Image (spheres, grey):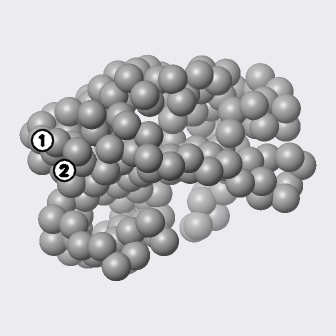
C-alpha cells in the first residue's frame, strides 16, 4: 500500500525473495538482490524486466546516490553486520530517498524462538533451507535506523501467531 499509485525511477529490493515486492512496485528500473540462486531464478520468471544481482548485499559494488527507493523485508536477522548494511543502503539512496523496511519484531521473536540461531524454512519450490538468524542484534534497531534515516512512520502489527509481531518502517535518507 505504501507504494501504490507512486512511480519511481529506480528501486532496489534487497533480499528480493520470491519477487512479490518487485511485482507490485511501479518503477522504470527494478533491481533485485538475493543470496539464493533459486530466488533469483523465481524472480526472473515473475519480473523478467528487472535486473538481478546474486550475492550478499553489503559486499556488492553499486553506484552511490542511484536509488529512489530501497525495500528490505525479513533480512536483517540474517545479516552479520547490520550497521554496515544500513550504511550501504543509505549510500545507495538519492538525497531524501525512501527506505521501506519490514522485519519481525525482535522481542516477539526472542519470546517465540528463544536465542535459536538457525532458522529452517521451506521455499516456494519445496526446498528446505537452514540459515543463520539472530534477533538479539536487532533489539536496538530503531536507534540504528535513526543514525542514517529520518523515520516517517513505524507500525508494529501482531500477526496473531503466538505474540509474533512485524515492525514496518517508512523512512527517508537524512
| 97 displayed left or right of 109 | left
Label number found at residue 65: 1
Locate the C terminus and report the quarter of the image it occupies: top left
Of helix, strand and loop, which one carries label 2?
strand
The furthest residue to the right: 162
Which x, y percent locates residue 143? 51, 23
Q: Quadrant of residue 109?
A: top right
**In this view of the protein, can residue 72 be seen by the observer?**
no
Label number found at residue 116: none
- Residue name at image x 86 percent, y 46 percent: 163
Which x, y percent locates residue 27? 22, 70
**In this view of the protein, can residue 27 be seen by the observer?**
yes
- Dot 2 alpha-carbon crowd within 10 angstroms: few under 14, some 14 to 19, many 20 or more: many
- Dot 1 alpha-carbon crowd within 10 angstroms: few under 14, some 14 to 19, many 20 or more: some
- Residue name at image x 85 percent, y 55 percent: 161
| 145 displayed left or right of 140 | left
Of helix, strand and loop, which one carries label 1?
loop
| 123 displayed left or right of 1 | right
Depth order, front residue of 83/58: 83
Depth order, front residue of 93/49: 93
Say which residue label 2 marks: 67
Where is 143 relative to 69, above or below? above
Which x, y percent locates residue 22? 36, 68
| 137 displayed left or right of 16 | right
- Residue name at image x 85 percent, y 32 percent: 111
Amino acid at each position: 500500500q505504501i507504494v501504490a499509485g507512486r512511480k519511481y525511477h529506480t528501486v532496489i529490493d534487497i533480499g528480493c525473495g520470491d519477487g512479490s515486492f518487485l511485482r507490485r512496485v511501479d518503477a522504470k528500473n527494478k533491481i533485485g538482490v538475493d543470496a539464493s540462486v533459486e530466488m533469483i531464478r523465481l524472480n526472473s520468471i515473475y519480473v523478467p524486466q528487472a535486473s538481478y544481482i546474486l550475492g550478499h548485499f553489503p559486499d556488492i559494488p553499486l553506484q552511490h546516490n542511484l536509488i529512489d527507493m530501497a525495500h528490505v523485508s525479513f533480512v536483517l536477522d540474517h545479516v552479520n553486520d547490520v550497521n554496515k548494511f544500513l550504511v550501504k543502503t543509505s549510500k545507495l539512496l538519492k538525497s531524501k530517498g525512501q527506505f521501506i523496511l519490514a522485519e519481525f519484531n525482535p522481542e516477539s521473536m526472542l519470546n517465540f524462538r528463544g536465542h535459536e540461531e538457525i532458522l529452517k524454512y521451506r521455499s516456494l519450490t519445496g526446498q528446505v533451507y537452514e540459515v543463520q538468524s539472530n534477533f538479539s542484534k536487532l533489539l536496538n534497531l530503531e536507534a540504528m535506523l535513526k543514525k542514517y534515516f529520518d523515520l516517517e512512520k513505524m507500525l508494529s502489527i501482531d500477526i496473531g501467531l503466538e505474540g509474533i509481531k512485524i515492525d514496518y518502517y517508512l523512512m527517508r535518507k537524512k
